[in-house]
Amino acid sequence: MTGRSRGGIVLWASRDLLRRPADALLMWLCLAATAAVLSTALLLTQAVSDTACRILSAAPSLVVRRVDSGGWSPLPVAEAVSRLRSIPGVVSVRPRLWGPASTENGPVTVVGILPGGARQDAIAPPAQGGARVGPGVAVRDGRLLLGAAGRSFTVLERLPPDTAMVSHDLVLLNWHDAGEVLGIPPGFASDLAVGVYHPQEAEVLVPEIAAALPWPVTITTRTEAEAAYSGPSFRRGSLALLAFSPGLLAMLLLVALTIRERVSRKEEIGLFRAIGWTTADLLRLHLVRALLIAVPGVLAGMVAAYGLVFRQGISWPSRILLGWPRPAPQLFLDPSGALQVLASIGALILLPYLAAALAPVLWAGLSDPRDLLEKGR
């Protein structure tokens, strides 16, 4: 009585599960919870890293900042731009004006928009006295007080919620207004955004740029900026995964419980062998039985984790990973690397569970049926 049909094996496995519905349900819940916990931690760190890299892909190849004995210092725009544009390989030099400023409800980041700048097609500079603010900036009666002097600005509009990851506490001002709020005189900028002809050669130009300027500077490449943003996310994600180490312990307990449950059914396996079932039939039966529990459970856990991380406008990760105070900004994370993470989690859970389900059956299937029946009694 060998070579049983696939449908017959599935029917036998389904009926076997119905014999112990409570055990099957508890195992399903444990697998789903384990998959959800592990997937959430890894999906979140991967998504934050991918989102940061996607945002920084539009960043300048190099950022040049002037430093002195007191730290950062504004740099003269005209002299710096003329010196850098003469370097072979540099295709654009754009001054930027930005920095922290105080408000009645805490600090914000002020950015000055230069008329006729490279981003004029994307963000038009507000008129003097006007401001565009991010989703997290508190506004009272359409007015915003900025800086130590408490200069008042009219809020023209809020930036879209889907930009909250970079614009949560952002205030966009006219270039002249931003300079007054930040205390930077006309003709000076916070730093320079430098574009190069070959982005992969940006690091080679760092010494030339430093030598071309008459003051000490720090130069940050796009690669260094990506590492600075993604590195802390991975470290915090690893700490979160360690905090969820009981989930890994639960996985080990599930494996041990599965092995014990299979070993306790020696008499049943011996009975199947006595009526003509082969070892291959028994392996197929228990494999299908394990898959009927494990695959739906792991998939349910992964779906729950995906919803927790990639639900539109989530805010809890920004408090945990990014350290944002309340109200936390809504995040719109990039799910591009989710499939690889979910596949890894699925293999991490399914392979040990299936091995634990089949190993005792294989050992018992190779034993003498009479011995199994006698040991069962």
Image (spheres, grey):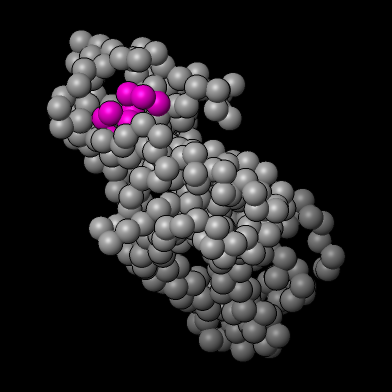
Q: Residue at x 36, y 31 (%)?
A: 186
Span shown in magenta = 175-182
Q: Eyeballing the image, is 120 above or below 69?
A: above
Q: Residue at x 57, y 43 (%)?
A: 82
Q: Give the image location of residue 176, x and y in percent.
A: 36, 24
Q: Residue at x 64, y 64 (%)?
A: 204
Determine the image quadrant of residue 137.
Answer: top left
118 and 87: which is toward the camera: 87
**The N terminus sits in image quarter:** bottom right
Q: Give the image location of residue 244, x and y in percent.
A: 36, 63
Question: Is residue 349 highlighted in magenta?
Answer: no
42 and 377: which is toward the camera: 42
Asked if residue 132 shows in the view, the reply is yes
Q: Eyeballing the image, is 159 above or below 33?
A: above
Q: Residue at x 22, y 26 (%)?
A: 146
Main SS type for the magenta part? helix
